[in-house]
Amino acid sequence: MRTVFNATAVTLALLASGAQAQTLVATSNIVINAVDRSVNFTSDVTSRVSGMKLVLDARDEAASFVASAGEIRGARLEAALGALRSEFAEAREASDQVLAETILAL
C-alpha cells in the first residue's frame, strides 16, 4: 500500500513539474515574440520615416522624453507620435517609448 502511495506521489510531482515547465516555456515565448515585434517595428519604421520632416523635427523632444522616462512630453513629439500612428499601422500598437526611441534612431 505504501509503495502505491509513493508511486502516486511521484507521478503527481512529475506531472506538476511538467505543467510548470510548459507554463514557463509559454511565458518565455510570449516575451520573446513581443520583443521581436518591437525590434522589427523599429527597424521597418526607421527606414520609412527618415523622410518625414515632422518626425525629424521632434528628435530633441524625443530625447527628453526617453531621458525622463516619459515625464517630459513636448508638442512636437506629440505631433510626431500622432503622425506615425496615422501613417503606419505598426505604430498604432507601439508604446510612446518605442516610438520615441525610433525617432532617435533616425
Image (cartoon, rainbow, N blue to C red):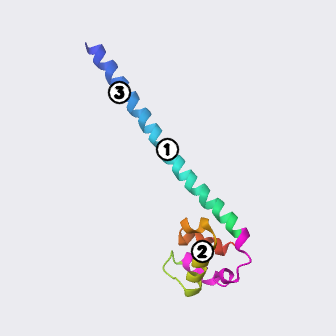
Amino acid on which the number 1 mark rests in the picture: Ala
Image: magenta residue range: 47-67
Marks 2/3 in contact by CB < 8 Å: the verdict is no
Residue under the point 54% across and 85% down: 74
Disc 3 is placed on an element classified as helix
Distance of label 3 from label 1 (alpha carbons): 21 Å
Determine the image quadrant of residue 52. Answer: bottom right
Q: Which residue is mark 3?
A: 12
Which numbered disc, 2 or 3, marks the residue that appears first in the sequence? Answer: 3
Q: Is residue 95 above or below residue 2?
A: below
Residue 39 pos. (x, y %):
63, 60
Q: Which residue is mark 1?
A: 26
Amino acid on which the number 2 mark rests in the picture: Ser
> From the image, which quarter does the C terminus lie in?
bottom right
Q: Is residue 92 above or below residue 57?
A: above
Between marks 2 and 1 in the image, the one whose residue lies nearer the viewer: 2
Q: Which residue is mark 2?
A: 86
> Crowding at label 3, few (<14), some or many (≥20) Cα neighbours within 10 Å?
few
Residue 105 pos. (x, y %):
68, 72
